[in-house]
Amino acid sequence: MVESSPRPGHDRGVVSGFVLSLVLCFVAIAGLAVDSGRLVAAHVTAGDHAENAARAGAQEVTLVRAGWRVIDPRRATATARAFLDAHGLEGDIRADFTSVTVIVRQRQSTTLLWMVGIDERSVSSTRIARLVST
């Protein structure tokens, strides 16, 4: 004789294991969504700070009265560095006579991915401000 249905209590724990797997998958997907959004926002913020620091440095124009328009690299670097320091940011600055390049680096902590061992990620952004002659 063949039974058409399992005995009561025969499949204990099967559904709970399946539900636990689904919950873990949903938490991982939510973690990716939330923390990816935070990383994108951190990248945009780093880009804004880098752009503003580069613009501030590029305003250090010299030799205007002599008929030249060039950036003073020393003053441009100091101005961009002061901007980054005022906002508590780390970064690199390169300046020459025609442009200022700023790279901003920052660490972004995760909100849900720490559960799988990802505590923080590094974000960086580079912006260049060029001197435009009119």
Image (spheres, helix red, strand yellow):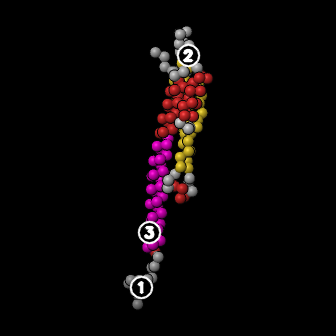
Q: Position of residue 118 (x, y in %)?
A: 56, 54
Examine the structure image and report whether residue 63 is included in the region drawn in magenta: no
Q: Position of residue 40 (x, y in %)?
A: 47, 44
Q: Counting residues from the N terminus, which is met first, the one under dot 1 or under dot 2? A: 1
Q: Which mark is residue 66?
A: none
The stretch in magenta equals 15-43
* Label 2 environment density (alpha carbons within 10 Å; few <14, some 14–19, many ≥20): some
| CA–CA distance in space, label 1 to label 2 | 90 Å
What is the secondary structure assignment of the residue under circle 2? strand
Residue at image position (49%, 43%) is 42
The residue tagged 3 is 19
| CA–CA distance in space, label 2 to label 3 | 68 Å
Q: Which mark is residue 62?
A: 2
Q: Nearer the viewer, mark 3 or mark 1?
A: 3
Mark 1 belongs to which amino acid?
A: Arg
Residue at image position (55%, 47%) is 121
Examine the structure image and report whether residue 36 is included in the region drawn in magenta: yes
Q: Nearer the viewer, mark 1 or mark 2?
A: 2
Mark 2 belongs to which amino acid?
A: Thr
What is the secondary structure assignment of the residue under circle 3? helix
The residue tagged 1 is 7
Q: Nearer the viewer, mark 2 or mark 3?
A: 2
Q: Is residue 98 above or below residue 1?
A: above
What is the secondary structure assignment of the residue under circle 1? loop
Is the C-beta separation of discs 3 and 1 under 8 Å? no
Image side of residue 14 versus residue 71, left or right: left
